[in-house]
């Protein structure tokens, strides 16, 4: 029987190891690789060509949302299952817009995680039971508000998304330029485009937007001058 190959993308080692041990107890899974950040996940997806990527939503350098978009560009056949400690509707909506086939909470049971991997492997969508129940009850006005949020996000290029995350993580232009391997003037131009597209004109506002749209989680410690 062909096993479902899985790439684990999670920046916390103890959590990643826990998922690996859990999946290795199942006869139909094979963990083919582990990534500690979004950029590594994209590189390993292209190299290892897994069936399913279990992707943490909040990772350093490149978050799971943008990593999902980039993984699906290099490996369109892959199925991405998003992981988060938070079930905010904006996170779920943005993950779906990025191309994720499902959304799991880290506190979900082993049964749910394994079942979700099997479902998305077959091309079916899967959301944590609590998320599915809440989405069924969402008021149309709430959906409209979240649609506006994700529409703004979809206007950003991949590089602008990367710059937005680094800004929200408190990186100065010089640090961002070094991280991305580009010039400071290029970073400044991306920052200018971000502010124009989002109609947000200060670092604190960009950071709040990054949190509300799930690019980074609110637990990230930020320094805003």
Image (cartoon, rainbow, N blue to C red):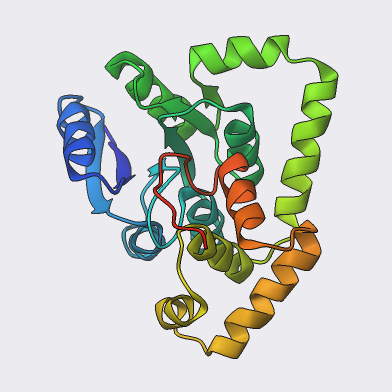
Q: Quadrant of the N terminus?
A: top left
Q: Position of residue 8 (x, y in %)?
A: 30, 45
**Front residue of this view, candidates 203 and 187:** 203
Residue 154 versus residue 56 in the image, above or below? below
Most extreme residue toward the front is 225
Q: Residue at x 52, y 24 (%)?
A: 126
Give left or right: position of 140 versus 153: right
Q: Residue at x 28, y 18 (%)?
A: 110
Q: Position of residue 132 (x, y in %)?
A: 59, 15
Give left or right: position of 72 versus 36: right
Q: Residue at x 31, y 43 (%)?
A: 5
Q: Position of residue 176 (x, y in %)?
A: 47, 75
Residue 132 versus residue 149 in the image, above or below? above
Total labels drawn: 0
Q: Position of residue 65 (x, y in %)?
A: 53, 49
Q: Residue at x 54, y 56 (%)?
A: 66
Residue 65 versus residue 89 in the image, above or below? below
Give left or right: position of 75 versus 28: right
Query: Visible in this render: residue 31?
Result: yes
Give left or right: position of 178 versus 195: left
Query: Visible in this render: residue 53?
Result: no
């Amino acid at each position: 029987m062909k096993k479902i190959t899985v790439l684990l993308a999670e920046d916390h080692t103890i959590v990643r190891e826990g998922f690996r041990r859990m999946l290795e107890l199942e006869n139909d899974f094979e963990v083919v690789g582990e990534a500690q950040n979004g950029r590594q996940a994209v590189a390993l997806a292209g190299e290892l060509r897994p069936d399913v990527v279990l992707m943490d939503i909040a990772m350093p350098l490149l978050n799971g949302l943008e990593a999902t978009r980039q993984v699906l560009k290099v490996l369109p056949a892959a199925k991405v299952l998003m992981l988060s400690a938070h079930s905010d509707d904006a996170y779920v909506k943005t993950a779906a817009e990025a191309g994720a086939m499902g959304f799991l909470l880290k506190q979900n049971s082993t049964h749910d995680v394994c079942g979700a991997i099997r479902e998305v492997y077959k091309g079916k969508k899967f959301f944590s039971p609590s998320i599915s129940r809440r989405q069924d009850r969402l008021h149309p006005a709430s959906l409209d508000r979240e649609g506006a949020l994700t529409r703004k996000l979809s206007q950003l290029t991949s590089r602008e998304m990367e710059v937005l995350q680094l800004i929200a993580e408190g990186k100065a232009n010089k640090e961002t330029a070094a991280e991305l391997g580009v010039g400071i003037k290029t970073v400044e131009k991306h920052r200018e485009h971000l502010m124009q597209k989002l109609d947000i004109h200060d670092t604190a506002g960009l950071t709040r937007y990054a949190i509300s749209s799930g690019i980074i989680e609110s637990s990230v410690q930020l320094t805003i001058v």
